[in-house]
Amino acid sequence: MKKLILAVVAMLLTWGASATVVLPKVLGSNMVLQQNSDVNLWGKADANKKVTIIVSWQKGKIQTVADSDGKWAVKVATPAASWDKHTITISDGEAVTLEDILIGDVWVTSGQSNMEMPVKGWNGQPVENANEYIYSAAKYADKIRLFTVKKARSYNADKEDCDGGEWQKASPASVANMSAVGYLFAYNLIESVNIPLGIITSNWGGTRIESWMPMSALKDILTDEQIEAKHNAHSIKPTELYCAMIAPIRNFTARGFLWYQGCSNLHDEDHYDVMMARMVKQWREDWGDKDNSMPFYYAMIAPHSYGNSRAIDYPQFVECQLRALEQIPNSAMAGNTDAADEFCIHPAKKNEIAQRMAAFALRDVYGQGGVDVIAPTYASHRVNGSNIFVKFNNTGAGLCPGSGKPIAGFEIAGADKVFHSAEARLEGNEVKVWSNDVKEPVAVRYAFRNYIPCNFMNIMGQPVVPFRTDNWNDAM
């Protein structure tokens, strides 16, 4: 028995002396690495041990030495995107080989439940055309790769690694469980850009933006009293998701960000834009982006009753999201008044949002414009008798419905601040709005309810953003 114990101890000591390198979960076989970049590779080895890295796309070896804690990191230049499959071998005496690696573009997606919602949907809450996306997924196995960060929390202390997750090829099984907006972004891009695409998604339903930010960033923009209030606003505290679900992936070199969040911050419209701008600044710094070259594309929160369809919490929050555009360089916002559900906060129309984000990327990143990708916004109005005429920005090739067809979603009010449902029609480059109940109108609103049926967009399907010409927060 004594000999057996000694043999086991000796074997364990031998294993410890030749331990393989340990890599973070986001570095693995099947991954996509960012093209034309100095990408980060990092991990752990025995303390003070030499680490050798061999990548199949270049000759020679890259060597470094782990520090006294066993940590090591190197930068490796990547070539232009291609369909070639590569390997990476990392060794501190015993080799680990990562296989089936593609070089392309990597996008990081994050947010709450409308970003988390998988292609297969949730119970009683489907994703439109989910079967089509799931059953066609296998043909994208060597084009789209997916990584989902496992949910985890850490208060104000950065985790070194994710609690779980691995890179997966697109397949019916992997796509079914992937963020619908994240996957469909790549699905809409892949044929046009014709390079491998990697999607890293880190999201958690029902969470607030402050949980996705470090404490240093929050202290830059909020008072101590505001931060304390946010500690009491949700079961997930400020910093917890940043530290556990963003910090472990921030070394992974990427092209840009997608964001779909805000419903849980619905009543923070007085400062959500400032928080969002500071979060984007932080993330770009974390990813080493010094010149705002990483695009940040985000979605308007989904129209929904939010307890009272006639209330105006939603459009007031959209005003805040619009203000964020002015504060965040290299950003764009996807409209979604046409992708709404009055009674379900998770609308089935996910492809519309993903497609609009993909259109931004085609224009900004891949130089493939040609379509009107920006949602029309209010420009000006004039009152003429009992009618109000409204002009818009970003109309592109035109607005619709035209040909004298009715436009739904407009309301007007007189000096009494009581809004009435209005009729609306396109007349030239203006919209004529009127109501028989308002003889002397002074204000006009469009889609300015938590939920109201509306159908106004440009001819490429970009929906007009909710707006108002008044500042009557108490007027309903």
Image (spheres, rainbow, N blue to C red):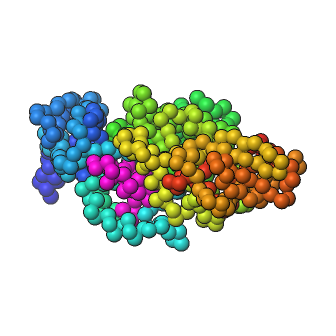
- Residue 472 in magenta stretch: no
Residue 280 rendering spot, x and y as whole percentages? 50, 36
Work out whether 72 lies above or below 94. above
Q: Position of residue 258 (x, y in %)?
A: 46, 46
Q: Nearer the viewer, residue 41 or 384?
A: 384
- Residue 240 appears in view: no
Residue extent of the magenta highlight: 175-204
- Furthest residue in direction right, as rendered: 416
**Residue 383 percent coordinates (x, y):** 79, 44
**Quarter occupied by residue 452:** bottom right
Q: Total number of numbered labels?
A: 0
Q: Residue at x 42, y 27 (%)?
A: 291
In front here: 324 or 23? 324
Residue 191 is covered by the magenta coloring: yes
Residue 191 position within the rendered picture, expressed as x and y whole percent measured from the top left:
31, 54
User: Residue visible at 85% across and 55% down?
Assistant: 438
